Amino acid sequence: MIKKNICDFPLEELEKIFLAWGEQKFHAKQVFSWIYQKATLNFSGMSNVPVRLRKKLEENLCLQELNLIKQVKSSDGTGKFLFELKDKNLIEAVTIPTKDRLTGCVSTQVGCKFTCKFCASGLLGFKRNLSCGEIINETLFLKNKSLPKKLTHIVFMGTGEPLDNYAEVLKAIRIINSPDGFNIGARRITISTAGLIPGIEKLAKEGLQIELSVSLHAADDKTRSLIMPINKIYPLEKLISSCREYFQQTNRQVTFEYILIKGLNSSLQSAQNLGRILTGFDCKLNLIPANSVGELGIEPPGQKEILLFKNTLVKNKIKVTLREPRGEDIEAACGQLRLQYAKKN
C-alpha cells in the first residue's frame, strides 16, 4: 500500500480522517502541533497521542517524502538544498537570512513550462506539479534546518510557477498560515508569478492578505516577450491592469521584480519606459542585477548603468529597492543547483 503524505491534509481534513477511524478529532490538533510546532518527524515520538492512533498513523500515512541530495552554503549565509522526491525527480529550496528575518524559498513544480530567459529552472523541461505535502515537506525541512533560528517568511519563488499549480499552492499556504500549522502571518507569505492573469484574478478573491510579487523584467512587449514568452499570452498592458485590480480588491501593495540583464533591459530608455508604466500605481519595485548563468548567456550590467536605471525611476517617484544578488558563489539562482547536479549525473 502506498502511504499518503500527512502533510497533504489541512487540519479540517485530518480531523475527518480521524473521525472515520473512530478517533476523537481533537487528536488532529495534537498531531499538527507535533509536526509543525515541535519539529517532530516521526509518529512514535508523539507522546500525548494514543498508542493505537500512532499505530494507525504509521500504517496509513507518512511524514517525509524528501531525500536531501546536496546542500551548499554561501559566504553571505544563503543556504541551498537539493532534494530527491519519491519518483526520483529533483527540486530545490533556499534559506535567505538577513539581520531581522529568515526567509524560506520553496519550489512548487518539478521544472517549469515558461522558459524565462534569465532562469535556469526550465532548462531541463517541465515534469510535474508538486503536491501540497511535498511543498510542506520543503517548508518543514527549512524550518527544522534553521533551528534555533525562527523561519519568519516564506516565498514561493523557487522552481516552477506557483499560479500554474494553484490548488496545491493555496492548500499549502493555508497550512503555513494556520495558527495550528506553521503560524506564519499571511503578510509574511509571498507568491511570485511570471504573470498568469487568471491566477492573479483568482487570488484576489481568496480573502488572504498574502503578498503578490510579479516578474516584470521589461517595460515593452517586444523585450518582455523575448525575456518571458508568457508575455505573448498575457501582454504587459493587461498584466499591469490586473495588478492594479488586485491592489484595489485586496488593498495589498504589489511588488514588481525587475532583473537587470546587460544589453537587454537595463538601458536608460528602458528605465524611462518603466517609469511611465508604473507612475500613479502604489507599488514597489525590486531591481535585481542578474546572476550570471553561463548556460543562458546572461550577466548583470555595470554598476554605473544600474545606478542610472535606479535614479531614473526614483525621479519618477517609483518606490525602488536595489537588491543585491544572494548566493552567487553557490549558484543560488533558480534551477542552477539542480541543473549542475543533473549534468554530473
Image (spheres, rainbow, N blue to C red):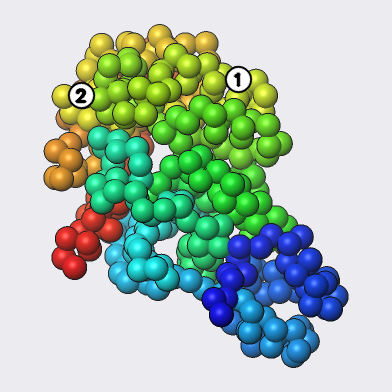
**Residue 200, horizontal then vertical, whole percent:** 55, 30
Residue 304 vs residue 41, the one in the foreground: 41
Whether residue 246 is situated above or below residue 182 in the rendered picture: above
- The residue shown at (85%, 75%) is 24
Pointers 2 and 1 in contact (C-beta within 8 Å): no
The residue wearing badge 1 is 245
**Residue 289, horizontal then vertical, whole percent:** 27, 35
The residue wearing badge 2 is 264
Whether residue 308 is situated above or below residue 161 in the rendered picture: above
Left or right, 226 with reference to 189? left
Left or right, 217 with reference to 234? left
- The residue shown at (46%, 36%) is 193
Q: Amino acid at mark 1?
A: Glu
Q: Earlier in the sequence, mark 2 or mark 1?
A: 1
Q: Amino acid at mark 2?
A: Leu
Q: Identify the secondary structure beneath mark 1.
A: helix
**Residue 152, horizontal then vertical, whole percent:** 56, 54
- The residue shown at (52%, 65%) is 137
Whether residue 285 is situated above or below residue 84 in the rendered picture: above
